[in-house]
Structures are given as C-alpha cells and as structure tokens.
Image: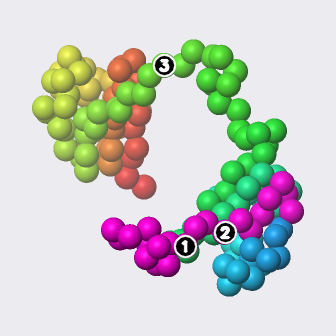
Amino acid sequence: MKWPWFRNLINHRPIPIVQDGEILYEGLRHARISIDVLLEELRKGKVEDVKKVALALWEAEGKISFFLDPKYEPLTPAAMQIDVQPFDLPRSIIKDGRIMYKELHGTQKDEAWLVSHLRSNYQTEVDNVLLATIDKNEKLRVFLYK
C-alpha cells in the first residue's frame, strides 16, 4: 500500500451509481451490479425512492454509500434548535427474577422501595420480573415473564 499506483489498482475509487435522483447506467455497468442490488442496498438504508438520493457511490469494499437530498433528510432536534436531555443509560435492577443489588444501591433506592413499587404499580413480585430498569428520573420500567 506504499505506492499510490498499486493502491489504486487494488482499491478502486468509488464509482457513482446515482446522482441527483438519476441512476447512472455506466456506473452500474462499471461496478458490475444490477438494479436489484442497488434497490436492495437502498432498502437496507430505509430509502424507498431513488429520486430522494443526491449521490450513491459503489465503494471498493462492495457496499453502497448514499446521501439523501437535504430536503428528504429526517428532522433532528438540532435542525429544529430544540434542547433535548442528554443520553442516560437506564440501570438494570432486576434480571431474570433476581435483584441486582449493586445497581440498585447505585440508584439510592433499597429493596423495600423496589418490592413495594412492584406490588403497588405492577401487582407482582420480584420472581415474576424478567427485566426491570430505572432511569435517572427514577422511572421504573418492568418487563414480566410471559
């Protein structure tokens, strides 16, 4: 990979196969892929219409990279200038009917609180819980065995 001419021989440059919503037949032919492969890769990326694609490239590794036209990009809170809460991974406090005491104590709660919460809100016991998680807002989510 030391010599650029050799690197270009092994790893070809990306081949454009869709541009501005139009399929480039020469690109498909050069990449040696069919329309079906192109459509399959777009479906994997949750793109249902080729017209929404600004650019699609056949990469050296055999995958398609595609970029949507900006008017079809999904809205994000950042695009709408909306403040959101930072991501917080909920703690698993019950797994397979067993209390995870270390995680429970990390939430500043105790076993008595957990048992009473399960009884009052879910009418169940710890043994019947497949998974229970608690987030930083102390919202308990319980998944029972079915």
Q: Give the spatial CA distance, label 1 vs label 3.
A: 43 Å
For the residue pair 59 and 47, the one nearer the viewer reads as 59
- Where residue 135 appears, x then y in whole percent? 36, 26
Q: Earlier in the sequence, mark 1 or mark 3?
A: 1
Tell me the residue that label 1 is attached to.
Answer: 12
Residue plotted at (65% across, 17% down): 81
Image: 79 above or below 70: above
Residue 7 in magenta stretch: yes
Tell me the residue that label 2 is attached to.
Answer: 15
For the residue pair 89 and 101, the one nearer the viewer reads as 89
Q: Which residues are magenta?
A: 1-22
For badge 3, the amino acid type reads: Gln
Q: Are marks 1 and 2 in contact (CB under 8 Å)?
A: yes
- Where residue 38 appears, x then y in whole percent? 72, 72
- Where residue 124 appears, x then y in whole percent? 34, 37
Residue 78 as seen in the image, left or right of residue 116? right
Residue 115 in magenta stretch: no
Q: Secondary structure at mark 2?
A: strand
Q: State the scheme by which the image is colored.
A: rainbow
Q: Are marks 1 and 3 in contact (CB under 8 Å)?
A: no
For badge 1, the amino acid type reads: His
Tell me the residue that label 3 is attached to.
Answer: 85
